[in-house]
Amino acid sequence: MQVELRNPNVIMKLSRLGSFHQSKLSFLRSFLKEFKDWEYKRDLFDLDEFGYGVAVYSFKKNNRVYSLICFANELSENERSDRVIATKWDAAFTLHDGVPTKKDIERLKNEVPKQEVGRLSYKELTLSRANKSVRIFDHVVESLSSGIQPDINLLSKVGYLYRTTAVYGSGKFGLADRFRIKNREEIYGPFRLEMMLVYFVRQFTFDQVNHVAKNKNPKKAVNLDPEICRNLGIGNSTGLGMAPFIVNHPTLLNNWIYAREVALKKIREIKNVKTENSDLFKNCLKKSIKNITSWNTESEYQKKKIKSLLRDLNIFINFLEKNFDFSKEFAFNEIYLWLEKNSEEECIEYVVSMMMEPYDDIVNPLINTMSSEEEKYFNIPTDRTVFELRTILENKYSKILKIDFSKKENNQNFWFISKNKEEPRLADRFMESGSELEQPLAIARDIKKLYDALSVFKNSSTIDKFLVKNSDLRHVVRRAFVIEKFPYSEIQDNTIGQSIIPIDMLRLKLSFFGALKFDPRSDKWLRICMFQGAPLPEQLKNYDDHWVYNSLN
């Protein structure tokens, strides 16, 4: 049986993309799988009694070494902020290519804590900073120094000791450009080095809290229980900086979504599902419920989604146990069709992620297809005709062409870059000044503008002639020829409309990172947890690929 790939006009709507969840394709999971047999070491741990100083962690295999250098700094309460305008943090980090010398560490000690204002070298691959969750960190120190383990219920409400506020890579602030390292097999997957940095940072938080507790009460202090460590991750505060990324990298976005869609298609085409695979699927499904019931947020928007997910998932599990026979042919296809009829988007996409769990043979080959050499698709085929371009627009952007941009609500917002931090922002066109500085991120409006401009040209006219008179539309002409080859490269929504929920764009990207427990703090920024439940470095040799669910039992 042939199953069609899902329709991009449905899947690429923001409400659907904003319902995606982590899966075996997620970058932090594929990173752990890739590095599970590397040698892990803590090479340096030079902290004072209060936990301030320098630490170095590394992964080594053959002649390749990646080292995280950590700088923990004293910070007063009024200096601590998760906002992008912050200039000081509890800790700052860089991932170094190779083994850092004392000279490297001295150089970086002056630059890494400055973050955007500092300057790194080609020897550094990624850069980050993080702040303590002070209430949790202090509680853990107090408990351990008294010889007892911390309150697990309190820890579970937050899920981490520190949260990062940015992770930079690929040439920013002097870091190594991607072309220097892109051919290394172990980091071919997207954001793999960023995932490595965050994983090392997680371990540093455990080592630091143990160290501070020990110094506070050397005779009585105990270390944080490894099982508690495993069930803590690293938090992250993420704002609008992520949103333009998925607009500005269409072929990369396509490759992420396409891998997911191909995995689903192949699973739906399995004629006879093996009992061990259906059992694993059901087992992961049941265990994952604890993940949802421990998902804390004050956001009414997210609470509604969690409630819908929990309701639909319980109905679905009940259907599987009472009414479904996995021995019938094409069982997963029938499951998927049932979900589309009976569940909302949040649950549909949750179960799609879960379907991949038993199928390494399907998922693993797809992981290596999720990068993109985007410059290959930069050239515009200027010998193509206006008729061909118009046909692409009608086929690929059919719903977008129906939007009336003369209506105020469809033109409500504009994207701009803030002057002080060069970060993307979204503003109301009719309430705030600055729309003349608008960034070219209103793709739906520009597609409509392109379509209208094409209507006055002859069908046989070539694109080069069209662009001579419409050079301002070059960026969107390029996108149209990209989507012809890459069907999942474009968000099929109006990113400047009144009804846009920007955190849907953030959630899409974060789901591919492997984030859990999305916690919107507004419609423009959210907190997440990464690596919660992941094996600790010394446990990687016995790596269990289903740790996301096993850790929650």
Image: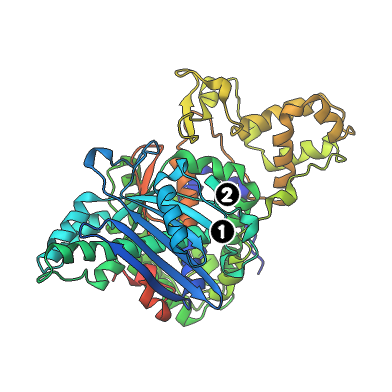
- Against 186, residue 455 (above or below) is above
- Against 547, residue 248 (above or below) is above
Quadrant of the snapshot with the N terminus: bottom right
Helix, strand or loop under label 1: loop
Indicate the amino acid at tag 1: Pro
Residue nearest the observer in this picture, 351 or 42:
42
Q: Mark 1 near mark 2, Cβ–Cβ under 8 Å?
A: no
CA gap between label 1 and label 2 equals 15 Å
Judge from the rendering whether residue 194 lies leftward or rightward of residue 231; answer left or right. right
Q: Residue at x 70, y 46 (%)?
A: 483
Judge from the rendering whether residue 178 lies leftward or rightward of residue 240; answer left or right. right
Residue nearest the observer in this picture, 318 or 463:
463
Helix, strand or loop under label 2: loop
Across and down, in percent, residue 343 comes to 43, 54
Across and down, in percent, residue 510 comes to 46, 52
Across and down, in percent, residue 487 comes to 67, 50
Is any part of residue 289 visible from this angle? no
Q: Residue furthest right?
A: 460
User: Residue 171 has which mark?
Assistant: 2
User: Residue 450 has which mark?
Assistant: none
**Which class describes the residues within 10 Å of circle 2: few (<14), some (14-19), or many (20+)?**
some
**Which class describes the residues within 10 Å of circle 1: few (<14), some (14-19), or many (20+)?**
many
Residue bearing the label numbered 1: 190
Quadrant of the snapshot with the C terminus: bottom left
Indicate the amino acid at tag 2: Gly
Q: Say whether disc 1 or disc 2 marks the residue closer to the N-terminus.
A: 2
Across and down, in percent, residue 315 comes to 36, 60
